[in-house]
Amino acid sequence: MKRFTLGLSAGVLALAALMTSPARAADPVTLGVSIPTADHGFTGGIVWWANEAKKDLEKAHPGLKIIVKTAANAPEQANQLQDLVTVNKINALVIFPYESASLTQPVAQVKKKGVYVTVVDRGLTDTSAQDAYVAGDNTAFGKLPAEYIAKKLNGKGNIVALRGIPTTLDNERFDAFSGVLKAHPDIKILDAKYANWNRDDAFKVTQDYLTRFKNIDAIWAADDDMAVGVLKAIDQAKRTDIKIVFGGAGSKGMVKTILDDSNKLIQADVSYSPKFIYDAVKLTAEARLKGEALPATTIIPSVLITKENAKQFYFPNSPF
Amino acid sequence: MQPALTDTPRRSARWLARIQAVGPLIGLIILCLAGTALNRDFATVDNMMNVLTRTAFIGIIAVGMTFVIISGGIDLSVGSMAALIAGSMIVLMNKLAGSGMAPMLIVLLGMVLALILGALFGLMHGLLITKGRIEPFIVTLGTLGIFRAVLTWLADGGALTLDDSLNNLYGPVYYASLLGVPVPIWVFLIMAAGGALILNRTAFGRHVQAIGSNEQVARYAAIRVDVVKIVTYIFLGLCVGVATVLYVPRLGSATPTTGLLWELEAIAAVVVGGTALKGGEGRVIGTVIGAILLSVINNILNLTSIISVYLNAAVQGAVIIVVAFLQRGRRND
């Protein structure tokens, strides 16, 4: 009898749920993942990790469906958002916006349709358009290398820096880097030029730094791709004054170098792994399956990678 | 009597050509003087070698581009083509590295593959443009996307990196010097001299110019327009192949950003050097000067910090426009 009423009331409840929100009967989650196409190493990593998340999570949760879409530019991404909502009928979205400003409105529209929205890495200009925000730590990305270099140079020396592409993200990193060094008056940043997160440009800029400055103690390459170009330029000029080259992001090549101790210039790196897309998808999917919400902001910390902990940052199958 | 008659116009034509070539050269000289004034290290041999070596890739591609542009065509795909060729070379060489083949042979095979791919891509462009009758702008805009996408797919969005032992063997092709001059500069010189010779001293070179200045008339003059055009694209493809052979040992890797915007740099070098973008006339030596000029601007900006780094691209743009203006002034004389 008791069981019967329970069953009945459950049935009524389910029916009621069906009538009010048809898709949520047993709460399956259809999660859309919208990310930029693989146009350089880092975004290549993003795409790879997003697909890893799909593979792992769909296996672990039968009620979960994940759709990964890549876009080559902001308008394309906005179109894909519409498709995800109308065609794929998603009820959760993880988006790595191509640009902050131009995608804020499209994302707000998606949220208005009742979709749970997690924004990754590049924040929207209006945070009410998102339910949760997951990002890497750009301040630590600049701060940790500066602290490491200052310590290794005993608070005295000449540094040259490379910068990426003029963006708020790059500014945040560089400001954090130079901010730390203000406390070390004997360390000079001789110059900081843009090399577009590109190996070839980093090679050229470093060649010219080496021509211009006869005494450099450390180079902050600010990116592992750029560090590759920096190392080649130093090799070619046969310079021995440089003691440290510090990249950033923890690409598998650099982490392997640290792990094997194969280059004395590369002793440390800072993590800013594209794996955070994996974490964001996992956090969102698991929370939504339970019907829970994520904290408003989750920062995936950037960590100093050295020989001791390099192993846990080494993912040989990732393209990045 | 007859030799004297033919001699005079030829000499005056040559004199005129020399005047026209002076515009970009003046620009380059002024730029070099400015560079020396701003930083004494600019005028060192080491710095000159650095600049010329890095000019070699764009310069070699620009030599081929000169022919295509003079014939009235354009190729927007060269940067992506270089990237795809670099990626294909690395994939092939890495595959062979495991097969126990002699490393030297593997590197040679990689180089041969680069030239074959370059020629094939050029042939494909030429056929689509002449037989397929599609505008070169559209054909090469299409392949620009295709080449880079295929490379990105090959690299899984990451980097393709050449096997370490092969890289050590291959490295000297970029880093070694012959008589104190790095190998890429020699190759650049040879390609430029060869290009100038073909353009000015062969029937083919004159046919290229004739087609660019008036295709209809060239057809009536029994020039095999389609064949000549196809050959210009194959030649450009080969130039891209040669540039890539020099490029790969520099970093030993290809990424989706390899060769990004090289097409614009190459086209800019050609036009700054005095070749008309509408075709018909141009000079290989001008292209060489144009290419050097473009990398000297960057070099000077890197060697100084008098202006904000945010404005670097503006300085480049301004210098390019000023040189083009000098050039135009000369031509109107």
Image (cartoon, coloured by chain):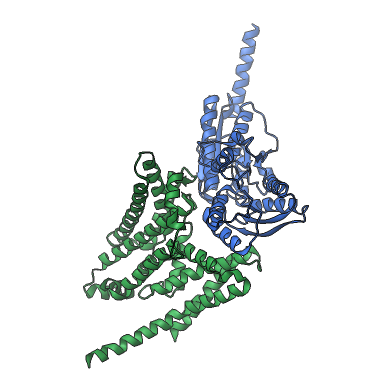
Chain colours: A blue, B green
Q: Residue at x 54, y 59 (%)?
A: A204
Residue extending farthest to the top is A1
Foreground: B142 or A42? A42
Q: How many labels does the image show?
A: 0
Q: Which residue is drawn at 50% across and 41% down?
A: A319
Foreground: B185 or A304? B185
Q: Where is residue A184 in the image (x, y as percent from the top left)?
A: 77, 53
Residue extending farthest to the front is B179
Q: Position of residue B239 (x, y in %)?
A: 37, 61
Left or right: residue A173 compared with residue B60: right
Looking at the image, residue A89 lies above or below residue B325: above
Q: Position of residue A79 (x, y in %)?
A: 52, 46
Looking at the image, residue B157 lies above or below residue B204: above
Left or right: residue B232 compared with residue B76: left
In the picture, the quarter occupied by the N terminus of chain A is: top right
Whether residue B44 is visible here, answered yes or no, is yes
Looking at the image, residue B246 lies above or below residue B36: above
Q: For residue B43, what is the image quadrant?
A: bottom right
Whether residue A130 is visible here, answered yes or no, is no
Foreground: A146 or A122? A146
Q: Where is residue B248 in the image (x, y as percent from the top left)?
A: 44, 53
Q: Residue at x 44, y 55 (%)?
A: B172
